Amino acid sequence: MNLLDIMTDPNTRWILLGTMFLGLSSGVIGSFAYLRKQSLLGDTLAHAALPGICIAFMLTGVKSTSFFLIGAALAGLAAVFLISVLTRYSKIKQDAALGIVLSSFFGFGIVMLTQIQQSEYGNQSGLDTFLFGQTASMVMSDVYMMMAVSFILIFTCTLFFKEFKLLSFDPGFAKGMGLPVVFLDYFIMMLIVAAVVIGIQAVGVVLMASLLITPAVSARYWTERLHIMVILSGIFGMLSGVSGTLISTSVNNLPTGPLIVLSATAWFFFSLLFAPKRGVLSSVWRRVSLKKNHSLEQERRKGRYTS
Amino acid sequence: MEQAALKVEDLTIAYHKKPVVEDVSFEVPEGNLIGIIGPNGAGKSTLIKGILELVPKLSGDITIKGATYKSMRKSIGYVPQRESVDWDFPTNALDVVMMGRYGHLGWLKRPGKSEKQKAMECLDKVGMAEYANRQISQLSGGQQQRIFLARALAQEADIYFMDEPFVGVDAATEKAIIQLLMDLKEKGKTVLVVHHDLSTVKEYFDWTMLLNKRLMKIGPTQEVFIPEYLQETYGGRLAILPDTKSGLLLK
Amino acid sequence: MNDFWIILVGALVAGSCSVLGCFLIVRKMTLIGDAISHSVLPGIVLAFLLTGTRDSVPMLVGAAALGLLTVFLIQLFQSSGVQADAAIGIVFTSLFAAGIVLVSLYTQQIDFDLEHVLYGEIAYTPWNTLTIGGIEAGPKAVWIVGSCFILNLILIFVFFKQFKLVSFDPALAAAMGIPVLLFHYVLMSLISMTTVASFDSVGSILVVGMLIIPAATAYLLSDRLSGMIKVSIVVGVLSSVIGYYSATILDASISGCMVGSAASLFCLAFLFSPTHGLVSRLLKRRKSKERYA
Ligand SMILES: Nc1ncnc2c1ncn2[C@@H]1O[C@H](COP(=O)(O)OP(=O)(O)OP(=O)(O)O)[C@@H](O)[C@H]1O
Ligand SMILES: [Mg+2]
């Protein structure tokens, strides 16, 4: 297929729109997660969705995307609550809390999954597509859903930009200023839950983390200003979504989710190497020239000294 | 002339673009207590880290008693700034002090009775013997600082680098610690201390180093610690009251 | 007999993981196990494509190589200024994505069960036995994971003081001349090796769970690193025993149940640990309030 065919194929157009919005919104919310040192929260929440999806299936007995999403969202909220309880009421650190919640939820999820497989519910296929994601199975209503959630995410981030900024930078100070820190904390995590839930269907549990982390880190290379970083991160996310989808439709048989992730990685490498100031090339160059200048100056001084 | 305890030549260190420590060269004689003075961000911690090879340097040679730094590692003691470690680490005070002995143990030997005894002695010297078995997160800030000091004592080094050992320490403890450092000095050891409280410099240190990116001055305290040089180091931001401080300074 | 083998493999995995997990907890790098267990996928696929067999040796080699690459890349990005957790996230998602793309590119040539590789089941281990010179020598997994366990124990025991100092105060360790980076890589290699060796037989979720949860439980129960390691091994072994029997009762995934038991034990410690438990701290506070009321 060439590009024109892709653009005119209605199904692909929908998918393209969906992944574009997904990349945009997870890039935006991901930059706050990065600054709050919660990059892997997305990974945890994606894994934590499994028991939620299983319970949704056990209760309703039907394979319906909307029920699954509701289940995943509720499980995500429970996970967020547990993470904050663990770090608040014990000396367990953030990273360990994420790991504990991730593996226990996923462990319980696997137990439920085997229960479902063995019981009269029968064919559970469709559940495991959630593990690896299946962009091709997205239908119009899924895309509408993604767009709606993305709009809400981006709108909220713009509205609460000031508060989120302060909270990510200095929670203690934010509290001193009278901001409802605990509430805002949960609020940001809830937004991440939302991004994860809409993302799982497209890229799957394991790769969801990437959409939240990689664009944000890439953006961080280019700027020291938060609002520029957020915008850039959204753009990187969007570009990854679009390029991943385009490549996967033009080459037969390649899954979209992993390609979106790999595009994001490509943007990351681009930033890592070429960003001014913080990029590898520029800092190597700076270090070399610094060393050269320095030794030149030393030579000069020594020369003066002896002459 | 007797051999210098520490000789630094042309030390330059940069993190990013600009060097934060530039062309620093000095020598300190053995058996001295030396205060390193300078404004925030002057590069005091960086200087120490550079000497200890904890950050890469652009240029510079370090010699300790005429030998290279690497061969003299065992005779160097280091007290980092207190925030540099995780105090929730599962370990107790005695154990932290025993870590000071690791450098002497070689690769395979495990700390045993004699190390434990040594560590207890050092804890006792800083007045922390009764807290030996206390989990380190349950110590106050000043007590944690004293544990670090005891660990440095346990290193039995010849030359010590201490980064702000008096932060968060009450006046009585500060006096006790300085007494300890004076004892070390009497035994011929050299101690370099990053210090912020200008009012006690004259009282504590034999030598003073004034640092602000470049080495402004180094030498015996009464020669170096005078308003003129201080103003230069602090960029004229220092308000020295004529009656109190300078009286003290020029005493 | 099969019960015994499964429990033994579970206990060995739990033991080898929790020893290493303690160091991950105190160094705040817990999720690195999760990362490694995912990012080895392209290594396994490549080994499979190159040799054309499902033999475990080439797969182990391929996976171990990727495990080290993961660690190296994480370290590289971190030293160029990326936060630790973000570096972990970028590396493992990229490698895993590359693995999936490889699988789908060669899907005609290979019959590759992605789910089995990632979520392998401990229940099948007793049937995959090792025969040496015609003599049945028990399940392969016991030998592989068992050697890992012993190697981990020996190295951690011999170099305990170095590992401890490097985790607690790397600056002092470096000033003393201990090769900090070397010990970092040794620890990370042990983790990749253990992860890779275990998950082929028991599935990645059990490995990840056992790297994190027993060590975290022990972190709440013990005030010394050496004690923490011992407690974590006990907790790990206990969870694999409890997990096995609850799995037979529930008729569910054994790996899942083992992780579930570990999680339940952690909850108990979180609530009732004598020193750090939530309930015991509340009780203590109430008591002292009463005394001064
Ligand atoms: N890891 C780092 N990366 C980049 N720059 C750094 C780093 N550490 C210190 N700097 C910079 O180097 C300079 C010197 O810092 P240093 O910590 O040595 O100062 P200091 O004299 O110890 O200050 P203080 O009295 O506040 O402890 C500062 O301008 C600081 O911004
Ligand atoms: Mg400092």
Image: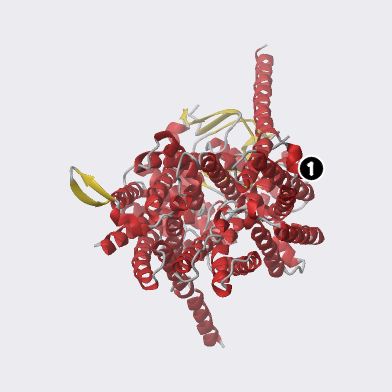
Query: Horizontal placement of B91 versus B6: left or right?
Result: left
| Residue C268: quarter of image | bottom left
Residue drawn at point x = 24 percent, y = 62 percent: C1
Ligand 1 is found in the corner quadrant, namely: top right
Tag count in the figure?
1
Give the SS element for disc 1: loop
Write the residue at 44% across / 68% down. A118
Q: Is residue B117 above or below residue A284?
A: below
On the image, the x and y values in percent for residue A208 come to 61, 53
Which residue is drawn at the image coordinates 63% and 35% (left, top)?
Answer: B218
Q: Nearer the viewer, residue A256 or C220?
A: A256
**In the drawing, does residue B33 fall left or right of residue C206?**
right
Label 1 beta carbon within 8 A of ligand 1: no
Give coordinates of residue C217: x percent, y percent. Answer: 44, 65
Q: Which residue is mark 1?
A: B236
Q: Residue furthest right?
A: A159
Residue C111 appears left or right of A221: left
| Name of the residue lying farthest toward the top | A307
Check disc 1: other Cα within 10 Å, few if <14, some if 14-19, many if 20+: few
Is A195 or C16 nearer to us in this picture? Answer: A195
- Residue type at mark 1 is Gly
In the image, residue C181 sits, relative to residue B62, either above or below, namely: below
Residue nearest the observer in this picture, A276 or C41: C41
Chain identifier of the residue bearing label 1 in the image: B
Q: Is residue A295 above or below residue A32?
A: above
* Residue B19 visible from this viewpoint: yes
Residue A235 position within the rendered picture, expressed as x and y whole percent measured from the top left? 75, 46
Residue A45 coordinates in the image, percent (x, y): 59, 61
Q: Is residue B101 at least partly visible in the picture?
A: no
Q: Is residue A271 above or below residue A65?
A: above
